[in-house]
Image (cartoon, grey):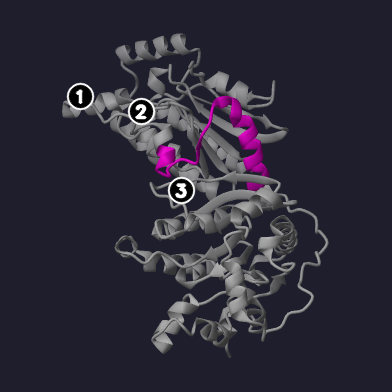
Amino acid sequence: MPRLNAHELVDIVLDEGSFLSWDTTPVQPAGGISDAYAAELEAAAEKSGVDESIITGEGTIAGRRVAVIAGEFRFLAGSIGVAAAERLVDAIERATLEGLPLLAGPASGGTRMQEGTIAFLSMVKITNAVVAHRKAGLPYLVYLRHPTTGGVFASWGSLGHVTVAEPGSLIGFLGPRVFEAIYGEKFPENVQTGENLHKMGIVDAVIGPERIAGTVSRVLDVLMGAQEVPSRVPNPDTAPDTVDPNSDAWAAITSSRRPERPGVRDLLRTAANTVLPLNGTGEGEKDPGLLLALAKFGSAPCIVLGQDRFRQDSRAPLGPAALREARRGMRLAAELHLPLVTVIDTPGAALSKEAEEGGIAGEIARSLADLANLDAPSVSVILGEGSGGGALALIPTDRVLSAEHGWLSPLPPEGASAIVHRTTDRAAEMAQSQGVHAPMLQANGVVDRIIAEHPDASDEPLDFVARVGATLEFELISLMREPSARRLARRMDRYRGLGI
C-alpha cells in the first residue's frame, strides 16, 4: 500500500484547511556543515519537498485544536539531527505552553549519522520536552508509521499515553539492515511489525491513516475530560428496596458465580457511550483477565480497569501482568487527572509458579499503593466475585459501589473454611461470619452504595448494567467537581478508621 508523506498525513488527519505550520528556517548543526553534507541536505530537500525531516504545526480535529509533529522519511530517511531536534523541541514546548494535546507521527531510521554523537544526544532534550508536556496533564498521542526505528522509537516514539501503529509497518529498535550488517545474519521475520507489537502488548492498536482522525477525536473526548468538567446529573435511584446485613451471604456468592452473570464487557457494551480499548502494559506484557479502556458513561470520562470474569479460568487466572496493566491505567489517570473506575470481578489472583516468579505479591502491593494514593477521582465497583489479593489491589478508591450480590473476601469462602475448619464443607458458615456480602460491607463502612439486582443480575443483565452505568456517571461527575485534597483525605480516613 502507498505510504503517506508528512504533509499527506497531516492533511488526512486534520480538518480540511486547518493546518498552520510552526516551522522556521532550520538551525545549523554545531561545527558547521561539510560540503558533502550540505549537498546531501540540498538533495534531500529537493526530493522530499520539505526543508528538514520534521514538520510541525497546529490544526483542528472535529473542531478541537491540536498540535502535530510528523516525520518525513524521504528527507534522509527521516533521521533526526540537531535542526530536526530543535524543531521538535520548539513545537512540543509551544504545545505545552498553549495547553494543546500533541499528536506525533514519526517515520524515521533514527539518529542522523552525519552529525554523530551530538545528534544522538538530542534525543535527551526531545524526551525531556515530552515528559514536561505529559506532566502538564496534556495528552501525547503517537502514530508509529513505516518505518520507525532506532533512537526515535527509543525516545519520543515510545512515550505516548496512547500509541497505535500503521498496518504492515516496520517498528523496531535496531533496523534489520543494520542488524544483518553487524551480525552477518538476517533478523527474524515478523518480529518488528506493528501487528506483532500489538500482539505483545506494546502498542494499543494497528489502524490505517484514514482512521486516525476519528480515533483521535474519540480519544481526546475522553482524555481532555479533566479540562472540560461536565455538568451535574441527577442522582439515580438504583438502591435495593431493602438492605439487610443479616441476609444470606452464601446466596449472594452463589448468585455471583452464575455463568450468565454480566461482566465488565457487558457493562461497557451497554452502559458506556464511548469505549476505546487499550492494549497491554506498553512494556511487552498483557493479560486476558484484565480489560483496560478509555470510556465515557454518559458525560463522565474515565479510564476503566476491569477484571474480565469470562477470561479468567484455570488456564488464564489473573496474573502479575494484569496488575502491571492496571498500574498503567493508574498512571494515565494520575497524569491526565482523569477519573479511574475499577471493576472487581475475580475468583482470585493466579496461584502458580509463573505468578510467584512474575512477582504477583509485589504487583498487588504496588497496585494497592498506587490506587490508594492516586491523585485523581476514583470509583470501584464490586460487580460480582471479589476474592483475595486480586480484588484488594483494585478496591481502595474514593467511592466503593457494589452490586447487590457482590462480595469481598480475603479468600474464597472455601479457602477460608479450609484454613479455619480444615474442611471446605463450612464455606457458607465462613462467608456469613466474615461479613463478605454487600449489605454487611456497607454496614461496616467498606461499601458506600449498593446497586439493586431485580432479583438477580443474571436474569436482567441489560437493565442491571444500565443501572451501574447511570450510577457511575453520577458518582464520577460528583468527584470531578470536588477538590483533590478533600477527596484524598477522605479516602485515607476511610481505611484508617475501619474496624475501630
Q: Residue at x 63, y 69 (%)?
A: 398
Mark seen at residue 181: 1
Mark seen at residue 280: 3
Residue 337 x, y percent position in the rendering: 61, 56
Q: Is residue 156 magenta?
A: no
Report how far apart the C-alphas of labels 2 and 1 lie in the structure: 30 Å
Of tags 1 and 3, which is closer to the observer? Answer: 3
Q: Amino acid at mark 2?
A: Ala
The answer to which quarter of the image holds residue 24 is: top right
Question: How would you classify the magenta stretch by its main secondary structure?
Answer: helix
Q: What secondary structure is marked by label 2?
A: loop
Q: Is residue 208 magenta?
A: yes
**Crowd rating for badge 1 (residues with CA inside 10 Å; few <14, some 14–19, many 20+):** few
Report how far apart the C-alphas of labels 1 and 3 lie in the structure: 33 Å
User: What stretch of residues is rendered in magenta?
Assistant: 197-223
Q: Amino acid at mark 1?
A: Ala
Residue 220 x, y percent position in the rendering: 64, 42
Question: Which residue is tagged 2?
Answer: 30
**Residue 38 visible to the viewer:** yes
Q: Are marks 2 and 1 in contact (CB under 8 Å)?
A: no
Query: If you read the primary sequence from the N terminus, does the residue marked by circle 1 or circle 3 appear first?
Result: 1
Q: Amino acid at mark 3?
A: Gly
Spot the residue most to the front.
425
Query: If you read the primary sequence from the N terminus, does the residue marked by circle 2 or circle 3 appear first?
Result: 2
Horizontal side, residue 134 vs residue 173: left or right: right
Of tags 2 and 3, which is closer to the observer? Answer: 3
